[in-house]
Image (cartoon, coloured by chain):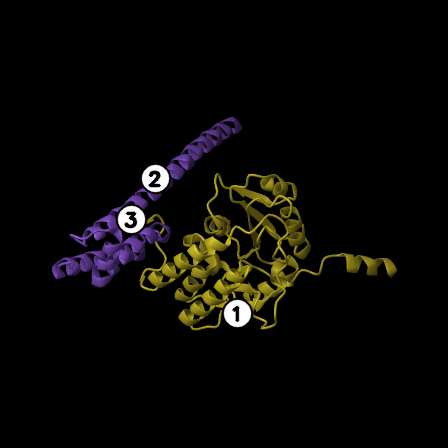
Chain colours: A yellow, B purple
Amino acid sequence: MRVSETVATAAPPTVDARLREIRRVAIVPALNEEHSIGRVIDELRAFDPGLDVVVVDDGSVDGTSRAAAAAGARVLRLPFNLGIGGAVQTGFRFAFEQDYDVAVRVDGDGQHDPAQLGRVLEPVLRGDADIVVGSRFASGLPSGYRSSRSRRIGIRLLAAIVSRIVGQRVTDTTSGFQALNREGIALFARDYPHDYPEVEATVMVFRHRLRLLEVPVEMRERGGGRSSITALRSIYYMVKVLLAIFVGLFRRDVVPREGSE
Amino acid sequence: MTPLSVSIAGAIASFVLVLVVLELIRSRRLRERYALLWLATGIVLTVLSAWREGLNTIAGWLGVRSYPPAVLFAVGILFILAVLLHYSTVISRLSDQNVLLAQRLALLEQELHEAN
């Protein structure tokens, strides 16, 4: 009795029965995260041992690929840095071509806690959404999330603009903590924005009439490395993203056909 | 003072540039990242052409007394230089990446060949 109890608490939380029947993959973009990538992969496995983990190494100059492979993940090593958008899309293309039913996206720096994946996956598994985004701000409570002032203002401003455009309250347009069903994977495999992609992607999702939901999550301090976004760059990104959003609104054919680029 | 016809022609031409750039982005023939400098060029030239006193004042600062629209040329040339320089860095990066891709492909082919 005693022994079995110990085993039960030590064992990972039971995997959702609905998960066991589908092909599922975790896409983990990583840039110079050799110190945190192993732990992220272990935590993903702890959440769901049957989850295939694909690390997209976006041209790291450290041992990210090696650490990821050692932790048992599949590694897609890009020959040079494509930027977060190109890296993540590599993962979506992989998921699409390998016929995965559900994909989750978790950053390689450890700020997304795989233990909260159940919350992010739930609406996709229930069939209520095509894309679910884990939001730092959806709960309305002051979150433990800390970052530079300019960045927080930028995030809020973008959220307000995007909410206005899509006609649904969106609180965190820069979160990369996501779960997608087959339709979501197919859309992003075909077309995904380049830098600071989540904002444009949110608008794109609505224009394709896919259903997007936000669920509240807590994010952690970054495990290692440093954010690729500095203060001056965020201004450039703001201008670029706003331009992309507004011009994108005038596109009729939202997603280009394969090979037309 | 700048002749009115010069102001009108300058403003129209610069504004058309802005529209063309926006259309190129919309039709996905130009990425936002490479369009920003062009847009800045178009917007600054449109403003300088249309805002006649402003152009005069700036010409005064620069000591251009005889023909204020010369400032339009100067600003236009500066922006074109900036765009060209930017493209030179972009081309350099692309050719580096191209070399890397070719090398990776050769290594991969060799590996594939040995595996068979």
Quarter placement of the N terminus of chain A: bottom right
Q: Secondary structure at mark 3?
A: helix
Q: Residues within 10 Å of mark 2 (few under 14, many from 20)?
A: few
Residue drawn at the location 18% of the way across and 59% of the way down: B12
Q: Position of residue A34 (x, y in %)?
A: 62, 43
Q: Position of residue A76 (x, y in %)?
A: 53, 43
Q: CA distance from mark 2 to mark 1?
A: 49 Å
Of B14 and A228, nearer the camera is B14
What amino acid type is highlighted by mark number 1? Asp
Name the residue that disc number 2 marks: B88
Name the residue that disc number 1 marks: A128
Q: Are marks 2 and 3 on the same chain?
A: yes
Residue B84 is left or right of residue A203, and the answer is: left
Q: Residues within 10 Å of mark 1 (few under 14, many from 20)?
A: few
What amino acid type is highlighted by mark number 3? Phe
What amino acid type is highlighted by mark number 2? Ser
Residue drawn at the location 51% of the way across and 41% of the way down: A59
- Ranked by sequence position, the earlier of labels 2 and 3 is 3
Q: Secondary structure at mark 2?
A: helix
Residue A256 is left or right of residue A210, and the answer is: left
Q: Are marks 2 and 3 in contact (CB under 8 Å)?
A: no
Whether residue B44 is visible: yes
Callout 1: residue from which chain?
A
Q: Quadrant of residue A136?
A: bottom right
